[in-house]
Image (tube, rainbow, N blue to C red):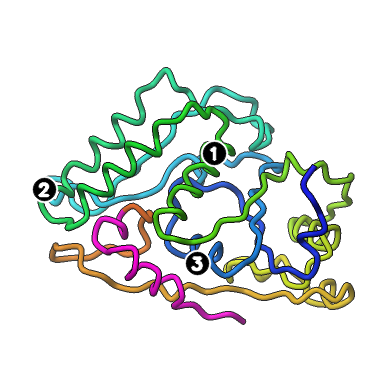
Amino acid sequence: MDNLDKYKGSTIAIMQPYFFPYLGYFSLIKHTDYFIVFDEVQYIRKGWMNRNRILAPEKPNGGWQYISLPIQKAHREALISDIYINNNILWKDKLLHQLEHYRKKAPYFAEVTLFLSQTLNTNENSIAHLNAHLLDSVCEYLSIPFNYTISSEMDFPEMTVNHPGDWALNISKYLNVSTYINPSGGKEIFPKEDWNTHGINLRFLTSNLPSYSQRREESIMGLSIIDIMMFNNSEDISVMLDDITLS
């Protein structure tokens, strides 16, 4: 069981484990003290836990393409904690192959592909643990502290959940935190009066996604962090991570 005293008075975020997510996910990590990788709710198929987007070759496809994790069969109601990677499929080789077209134009292609080759060299087969490992590796690459715990390993007491926002409130109350930060897209599931009653500061983070050169006629923003790493050094990305609005 994690030492709960460290959370008292801290700022936390709680997010499902996404696969090489976009910049805003890492802004949330950077601006919190502790991060709960939340794997105790139903796994959503065709979401962001087993796939993300990178640039596609300009010709003939253009636009963007998916990178993805192959998932073992599981029942439709399976929790994230019960989802496992199908490592019989050579998905790591495929992912690295999908990045090859960056070689011609991305200034950081060599170091990013070397980094990915190393961080993908893991035997993790739980989607929650694998994605947490990948998040941790990217944070280390970007020199961002990532103090995380996977929720299914925290032995929380049984919690009453009447709507999706109750998870974050109950966990924040249990950990005795001072502030909870959520991406701004989820405002509607967090009644502010519930948080005020328990003296917890509820804040919403908006990442002001920057534009950057992708060395092509039409840039596509909001892609996986991998794309940003291909075209920007870690110092510049750190500045991007601070370009946020907290409300």
Direction from residue 20 to residue 84 in the image, left or right:
right
Q: Which span is picked out in magenta?
A: 227-247
Q: Which mark is residue 45?
A: 1
The dot on residue 59 is: 2
At x 53%, y 80%, the residue is: 245
- Type of amino acid under label 2: Lys
Which label sits in the foreground, 1 or 3?
Answer: 3
**Would you say residue 188 sits in the magenta stretch?**
no
Disc 1/disc 3 C-alpha distance (Å)? 25 Å
Of circles 3 and 2, the one toward us is 3
Which residue: 79% across, 51% down? Answer: 3
Of labels 3 and 2, earlier in sequence is 3
Label 2–label 1 contact, CB within 8 A:
no
- Crowd class of label 3 (few under 14; some 14 to 19; many from 20; radius 10 Å): many
Q: Is label 2 in a helix, a strand or a loop?
A: loop
Q: Quadrant of residue 141?
A: bottom left
Q: Give how far across and how far down residue 44 sits, in percent.
A: 59, 42
- At label 1, the amino acid type is Arg
Task: Give the left or right position of residue 70, taking residue 44 as reference.
Answer: left
Q: Is residue 237 left or right of residue 194?
A: left
At 29% from the left and 46% from the top, the residue drawn is 65
Where, quadrant-wise, is the C terminus in this rendering?
Answer: bottom right
In this figure, which residue is indicated by the disc labeled 3?
A: 27
Element on which disc 3 rests: helix
**Which badge, 1 or 3, comes first in the chain's sequence?**
3
